[in-house]
Image: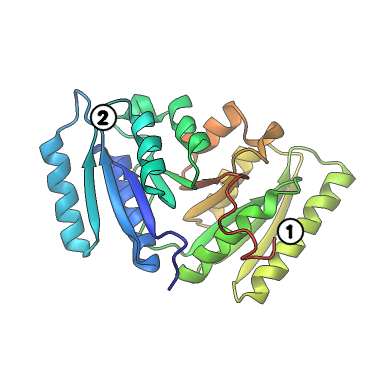
Amino acid sequence: MNTAFNKILVAYDGSDSSKSAMQSAYGIAQKFNSEVTALVVPETTTDMELCASYLLKFAETKHLKLEIIQRKGRVYDEVIQLEKEHDFSLILIGTHGTSGWKSNWMGSNAYKVISSSNCPVISVQENKSSPELNHILLPLVNSITTRQKVSYCLKLANAFGATVHVLGTSKNSSSETQKHVHSYVNQTVNYLNQKGVQCTQEEKYGVNVPETCIAYGEEVNAGLMLIMTETESAGFFMGSYAQQLVNSSTIPVMSIHSRDTRLMGASGY
């Protein structure tokens, strides 16, 4: 049995973005037989009765194993604390809700959850999610750890039967950079092909990396983009670039830490 994402935590406040996050959680849970927990941290605009009603109906309709937890405090603190207490293997959050936690999830607070968690975090915009995952975008940059996320990509691609679109990219267009990135792209595509995963490959240099990733993801109809949070930060996904990618991406983004080694060795990287 595939247990890579056996325990999933969803931050839920009733907004459209948190409903999209629930849809993504359901899709992954179906493939990995996951236990799903919905965390609700009430604020002044949160209708707890409505939240509970929606979640219970969603779980019943989807035949989903769902636990609902309510806590008081700051949303960011409660998400991270709950993750540590129960050792979740994946967190999902909505990034552009129209109510509830909108001001908390956008900008720096959303990135605090991503940067402080021990497990991968998928951020989802409203109405940008589907239980099905047919195409995955895998950007690779000039970093020795850029391929660390391949382990997670392989698990997801195998579970969903998805096509992986490998994008080698950099804001630098030097021949040395292109040589390194091209090597990473070829190694990754060859490895995934050996594991039975269908791939495409593309390379783009001298570009704005976040904008290029988003545009290419839309072009290939990607349902998920995988990035590293620290190891690809130098001029790529740090600061305003990271917030731009997480908050502006029309594609759900899975952010993975270089310190996350739970799947290391599973892919040979």
The front one of 42 and 98 is: 42
Classify 152 as above or below 234. Answer: below
Say which residue label 1 marks: 185
- Earlier in the chain: of badge 1 and badge 2, it is 2
Question: Percent x, y for residue 168?
Answer: 71, 52
The amino acid at mark 2 is Gly
Q: Which mark is residue 129?
A: none
- Image-quadrant location for residue 231: top right
Residue 235 at least partly seen: yes
- Image-quadrant location for residue 23: bottom left
Residue at 32%, 34% (x, y): give it: 97
Q: Is residue 116 left or right of residue 17?
A: right
Find numbered disc 1 in the image and state the secondary structure of the residue it sits on. Answer: helix
The residue furthest front is: 85
Residue at 65%, 58% (x, y): give it: 166
Q: Quadrant of the C terminus?
A: bottom right
Question: Percent x, y for residue 188?
Answer: 70, 63
Q: Quadrant of the N terminus?
A: bottom left
Find numbered disc 2 in the image and state the secondary structure of the residue it sits on. Answer: loop
The front one of 254 and 219 is: 254
Question: Percent x, y for residue 43?
Answer: 22, 26
The front one of 204 and 263 is: 263
Colour logic: rainbow
Q: Is residue 147 left or right of residue 84?
A: right
Measure the C-alpha gap from mark 1 to mark 2.
Answer: 41 Å
Say which residue label 2 marks: 100
Residue 125 at least partly seen: no
Q: Mark 1–mark 2 contact, CB under 8 Å?
A: no
The amino acid at mark 1 is Val
